Amino acid sequence: MKKYVKTIIRVDEDGRMRPQALYFDGEKFEIDRVLDHNPRTYLDHGGLGEVWRVVIRGRTAYLYYEWNRNIDSSSHPGKWYVISNSA
């Protein structure tokens, strides 16, 4: 199940984003390390964007950034989400 999450990011002077933490069910999870990230098409849960493979509390996790398909929406370029197994 796709679950949108509040995410704290750092943007460098070249415009590159790097997630620092995310909130899931009201709890803050610091991202210890980014292992890699790639642009992708997600046919299984829909959308275009980037997948970030990160380490949170010693475990590998995947954080997704969904690009906004509305070109005219520069103030809202996209949303962050995770795939949750909980209902």
Image (cartoon, helix red, strand yellow):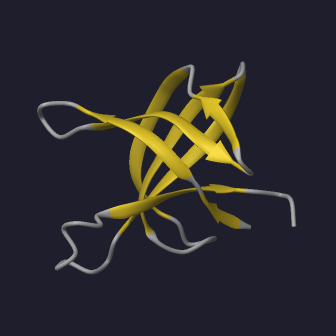
Left or right side of 19 for 13: left
> From the viewer's perspective, is residue 1 above or below residue 23?
below
Instruction: Please name the residue shown 69% across and 48% down the image.
Output: 24
Q: Which quarter of the picture shows residue 10?
A: top left
- Which residue reaches farthest front? 26
Pinpoint residue 32: horizontal percent, then vertical percent: 57, 20
- Which corner quadrant holds the N terminus? bottom right
Q: Which residue is drawn at 48% across and 26% down?
A: 34
Q: In this view, does 54 lie to the left or right of 9?
A: right
Residue 22: x, y in percent?
57, 41
**In the rendered view, would you say 5 is above or below 58?**
below
Nearest the viewer among 63 and 5 is 5
Q: Which residue is situated farthest in the left direction here?
A: 14
Mark count? 0
In front: 59, or 39?
59
Task: Give the quarter of the figure containing the C terminus.
Answer: bottom right
Report whether 63 appears left or right of 17.
right
Is residue 10 shown above or below 50? above
Q: In which quarter of the image is residue 28?
A: top right
State left or right for residue 44 relative to residue 64: right
What residue sits 45% from the left and 31% below the top? Answer: 36
Q: In which quarter of the image is residue 27?
A: top right
Q: Where is residue 33 in the image (x, y as percent from the top left)?
A: 52, 21
Residue 70 drawn at (x, y percent): 27, 81
Q: Which of 52 and 87 is in front in this view?
A: 87
